[in-house]
Structure formats: C-alpha cells, structure tokens
Amino acid sequence: MTEAAPTPAALPPHVVERADVRAAIANHDFGEVFRLARLHGKISYAKIAEAVGYKREHIGKMARPEADGHGVRPRITQHRKILEVVDALRIPGHLAGLAPRPWEFERRTDVSRQVDPSTLLARGGAGLWDVAELLRRAEMSDINSAALESIEQGIDQLARAYPYADADHLHERTRNGLQYVTKQLESRMTLRQHRELLVDAGWLFLLNACVQYDRGQSEAANLSKAAALRIGDEVGHGEIKAWAWEIEAWFALTQSRWQDMIDAVEAGHAADQTHSVGVQLYAHKARAAARMGDARLVRDSLDAGRARLDRLPRPDHPEHHFIIDPDKWDFYEMDAYRLLGDDERAAQHARSVIRISTGPDGTETSPMRAAEARLTLGVSAARTGDMEQAVGMGTVALEADRKSLPSLLLVANELDRELRSRYPREIASRDFHERVVSIARGQAAPELPF
C-alpha cells in the first residue's frame, strides 16, 4: 500500500470520496473544488494558495459561487497549472482524467503511523468483508480463525470511523457487515466460532443503532438496539448488553424521558462493571439530572464517572465509538454546566471540546461534538447579551456535515428558546428558529426501516 506525502492543502479521504467533489474534479472546476475543500475539509484558502502558488485573493475569486451576481468565476485551463493543483491537493490522477501522479507511487515513509479507518471506508462496496471471504476460501473451510479476525478488524475500523464518517456511507458499510456475518452464521462451525460471530453481530447491531438514530431512523434504531441486547443476553456478553442500555439511555435523553433514562443507566451498570461503558452511563445520568434541575445528582454522577475513567488505561484508539476516551469528559461536563446555568464553566469546556476535536491541519475529527460545543457557546453568548455571536455559533453548528440529528436538535432547541425569549423581535432570532424547525420537520419525515 502506498501513501502520498502530505501537503498543506491535501484533501482528506472523506472529501475526495464526496460525489460533488469528484464531479468538480472531473469537470476541472477547481474553484468549486477549493470551495468544497474549505466547506467539508476545513482547508483554508490561505493553505490552498500556499500549496498551488496563487494569491489567496485569487483562490477566493475562483471559489466564489457563480450565482452570487459576479458572473462566471475564473477557471484553471493551463495543463501545467492543472497538474500543480492536482499535486497540491493530492487528487488521484484518474479522477481528473490524468495518468497516475508520481507521488501516488511513493512508498510510505512513516511505518509507525496508524491506519486511517476512512481509507477502508472509502473503497466502496463491501470491501471490509471481502477480505474475510477471501481468507475463508483460502483455507477451504466454512469459517476459520483468520476470517473471524478479519471480521473483527472490519468492525473495529467502522467503530473508529464513526465520529466523522458520512452517516449514509457508514450505514451502508455496517449493513454490509451484518449481511455478511448473518450469512456466515448459516455455515458449519464450532460452538466457539458461533459465539464469536454472534458477538460480532452484536457489535454491528450496536453501531447500526447509533448510525440509524443519527439519520433520524428511530424505529429502525430501536430494532437494532433490541437485537444487540438479545444477542448480549444469549451469549452472556455483559459489555454488549451495557452498551445496548447506554444507547437506550441516549434515546431517552433526546426524547426527554428522564425516568426511562435513569432506569436504562441502572440496567447498564448491572450488566457490566469493568469496561468504559460505565463512564458513559454516569455521564448520561449527569445530563439527565441537569435537565431535571438536580445539581447534587449532577455532581455526584460526574464525580463517579470521573473516578471510573481515572481507573481505566488510556486507550490506543480513543476515537473508537465504544471506548470512552478521557478527552470526551469535557463534553459531558460542558453539557451539564450549560443546563445548570453555569455559563462560564460551560463555555470553558466547550472551547476545550472544539480544540480537542480539531486536528493539527484544522480538520475536525469529532464534528458532532464540535457542533454541540458551538451550540453551547451560542447559549452562553445569548445569555450574556451577544445575540450576533449566539446566532453565528448556532448557524455554524447546524451546517455541520456529520451530525446526530436528535442530539443536535436537543441542544439547538435550547439555544432557540434562549434567543426567542431574549430577542423575540430580532430577524436573526426568528431566522434561526425557522432553521431549527426546518431540520426538525425533516427529521419527522416518514422513515425507511433500514
């Protein structure tokens, strides 16, 4: 496997895989590529200008929408400059109708660098599961340890990509995995292999439930969660059961079912006492207590969760969705303090969340957390009289590409209520309200089961 050397404006894999980006590249509309790179990859025009050798102002002119009344934007037509742009943005040659570029053949120089899970997701089809099928066929058996290990690696990649991967893309890959594992369960195997495959299915159902709920498919998400819980019961897997109850607690939180949430948290603790899921359960309890106005329960729950977190080793892959990383604790405290009205502490944690969620190149690695952090800063700004800052933060949050609709709307509604209460006659306040209502209305549209 090869890897291109980085440049200041190299497009992240999830940006290169977007249909609109690929269409712009194929049409040699690099101004549109620049615009989409900034929008979806958080690559500034200054970085692009540095990489391609243009002035920043010229990049801005090329990226200007043609519908803004300024006529047709400038285009790059010289073959030499097209090659420079393709190389600067690390666009594979075939996407632009060119031969492979020299850097596409460069060998990886950093052997210690961790594999980016998005590179697996970007390959299309059911590639994660094809590897397991090839290994199975190589040994001419119904199932073997190599195939089982490959399946586990595929699930690990999906769970690590969850924080930022496109929800539709991730949903498709997870469904592919469930279909593959279900098919394998029909084969001849030992009891141990059967249990391992059931455990794999349990993790996939858990991830599927999360992605479906992010997409607004609440009924389908409930079915996936129930399937995971049933598998956890059948194979005696406490961690899977605890995560199923954690997901139920999350559902209850976003639906304002406080007692149901508390009950789910207690059931999760009863199912598992050793893994990091317990940290998340304590955090959910704190968030529910904050919404019920119980400050003492908030503090007790946060203290218990922090103590559990401090006893756990720091994970090798903190981005894994089913492993609680220490950096996420700011996110939980941010939510609790915002609801308790401690705006200063909430804003402090929100700024920390945004900082932690942003990589060295400016790309957001946890866009869903960052969006809720911006909404928190918006709530704080509204309460302190800065309506413009409040609306600005809220608007950026709602425009996030990767979002969990129920969670986002939960906090967006808080900001909406603050704006309507404090600035009922301001146009910006009413416009923000309409945007929130529009998103909620879209979420309420008839949903497909899967």
Image: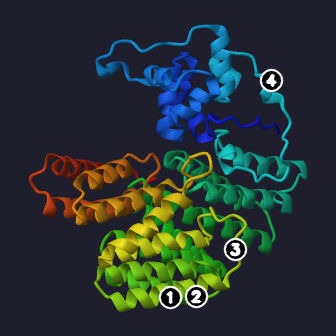
Label 4, label 1: how far apart the Cα atoms are: 54 Å
Label 3, label 2: how far apart the Cα atoms are: 14 Å
CB under 8 Å between discs 4 and 1: no
Would you say residue 366 is visible in this rendering? yes
Q: Is residue 78 left or right of residue 105?
A: left
Q: Position of residue 310 (x, y in %)?
A: 63, 83
Question: In the displayed structure, would residue 284 be above or below residue 404?
Answer: below
Which disc, if any, is residue 303? 1
Question: In the displayed structure, would residue 269 be above or below residue 415?
Answer: below
Q: Which amino acid, mark 3?
A: Arg
**In what quadrant of the picture does the N terminus appear?**
top right
Q: Position of residue 365 (x, y in %)?
A: 57, 53
Q: Which amino acid, mark 2?
A: Ala
The residue that label 2 is drawn on is 307
* SS at circle 3: loop
Q: Which amino acid, mark 1?
A: Asp
The residue that label 3 is drawn on is 314
Which disc, if any, is residue 102? 4
CB under 8 Å between discs 2 and 1: yes
